[in-house]
Image (cartoon, helix red, strand yellow):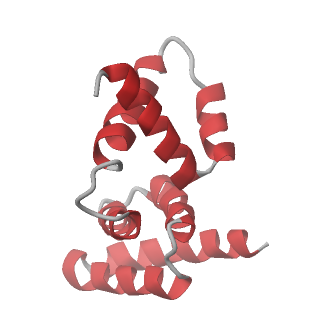
Amino acid sequence: MNDRERHEAGMTVRRQVLGDAHVDRAIAGTDEFTADFQDFITRYAWGEIWTRPGLDRRTRSCVTLAVLATLHHDEELAMHVRAALRNGLTPQEVSEILLQVGVYAGVPAANRAFKVARETLRQEEQ
């Protein structure tokens, strides 16, 4: 794929995983300062990685949740909890992933992640 095709494929997957409303807000907030970054994440994160056939989207969501929880990237974690639900994970599966984080990344990381995930799941129920 060339860069244009990768961007188009990335935007399609980005919208499917994160939802149109989230992507529309990100695009609306793009300006000259952030345009290259938005293009970068669309082409590489979404157009290169999330489109690869080696893992399905559920599995990619599991990995992403664990990494974001471990690194304390709470805003991204909340966004990807929503994405995980779109990718077919249940709240119970999200909980299991965070339990795994507690064992391998530490209880404080999991504690913080459970707080973020619980609030996000509550918002999604409304």
Would you say 29 lies left or right of 69 here?
Answer: right
Count of numbered marks: 0
Could you say where residue 68 lies in the image, as x and y percent from the top left?
36, 60
Could you say where residue 54 lies in the image, as x and y percent from the top left?
22, 60
As displayed, is residue 20 above or below residue 73? above
Residue nearest the viewer, comparing 99 with 85: 85
Residue at 36% over, 31% down: 43
Residue at 46% over, 79% down: 94
Q: Quadrant of residue 46?
A: top left
Could you say where residue 118 lies in the image, as x and y percent from the top left?
58, 77
For the N terminus, give its image quadrant.
top left
Could you say where residue 125 lies in the image, as x and y percent from the top left?
73, 76
Residue at 55% over, 70% down: 85
Q: Quadrant of residue 6?
A: top left
Q: Residue furthest top?
A: 32
For the C terminus, give its image quadrant.
bottom right
